Each structure stands twice: as C-alpha cells, then as structure tokens.
Amino acid sequence: MTEIWVTFKITEKIPAVGRYKCLVCGLIVEIPQKFIDMGKTFFSCPICHAGTDGGPRGSQEEIWEFLG
Ligand SMILES: [Zn+2]
C-alpha cells in the first residue's frame, strides 16, 4: 500500500473529514463533517500559532498534515 503524504496551508479548503496534525507542534485536530459541508478552509494552529504572521510558519506555508 502506498503512503500518501498530504499537507495543507491555511488558505486551502479542507478536503475531507478526519484527523490533521500540525507539522510544527504535533497538535492533532479532528475535522467534523460539518466543516466540510460549510466549505471551511484550514485555520491557524491554536497551540503554536503556525499559519499566522507572528507564528513559526506563515499563512503561505503548509502546516497541516492529513492523517486520515
Ligand atoms: Zn501547532
């Protein structure tokens, strides 16, 4: 089986329900179906603030990894 490595920036639309891990601090968040239905985009990390201008990675860098 092929491992799929998929990472996202906060400007991208959340593609699927499941767990996503912050590439900077390792925080794991669970994305519910509700977010997909609403067409939400990713958000900055609530712990290390990756994805914000003052954080360890900016909004144009990939910070979330899809775990499944
Ligand atoms: Zn983080």
Image (cartoon, helix red, strand yellow):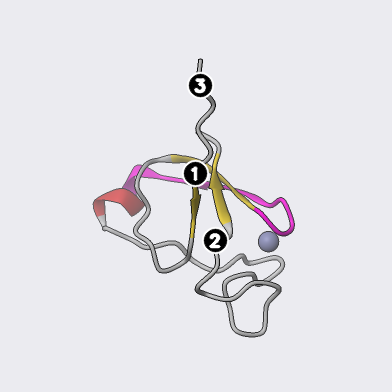
Residue type marked 1: Val
Span highlighted in magenta in the image:
23-34
CB within 8 Å, label 3 to label 1: no
| Mark 1 residue crowding within 10 angstroms, few (<14) / some (14–19) / many (20+) | few
Report the Cα–Cα distance between label 2 and label 1.
10 Å
Q: Position of residue 42 (x, y in %)?
A: 44, 62
Whichever of callouts 2 and 1 sits on the residue coming sooner in the sequence is 1
Q: In which image quadrant can residue 39 be found? A: bottom left
Q: Earlier in the sequence, mark 2 or mark 3?
A: 3
- Three-letter code for the amino acid on which mark 3 is drawn: Thr
What crowding class fits label 3: few (fewer than 14 Cα within 10 Å), some (14-19), or many (20 or more)? few
Q: Relative to residue 2, is residue 61 depicted above or below?
A: below
Q: Which mark is residue 6?
A: 1
Question: In the figure, 32 relative to 35: above or below?
Answer: above
Image depth: mark 2 or mark 3 in front: 3
Residue extending furthest toward the top: 1
Give the secondary structure at mark 3.
Answer: loop
- Dot 1 lies on which element? loop
Instruction: Find ligand 1 in the image and state its quadrant.
Output: bottom right
Q: Which residue is mark 3?
A: 2
Q: Quadrant of residue 64?
A: bottom right
- The picture places residue 56, in percent across and down from the top left corner, at 71, 73
Q: Which residue is mark 2?
A: 62
Ligand 1 closer than 8 Å to label 3 CB: no
Going 52% across and 74% down the picture, which residue do you hit?
59
Q: Position of residue 48 (x, y in %)?
A: 71, 68
The residue type indicated by label 2 comes to Glu
- The total number of labels drawn is 3
Residue drawn 59% across and 76% down? 58
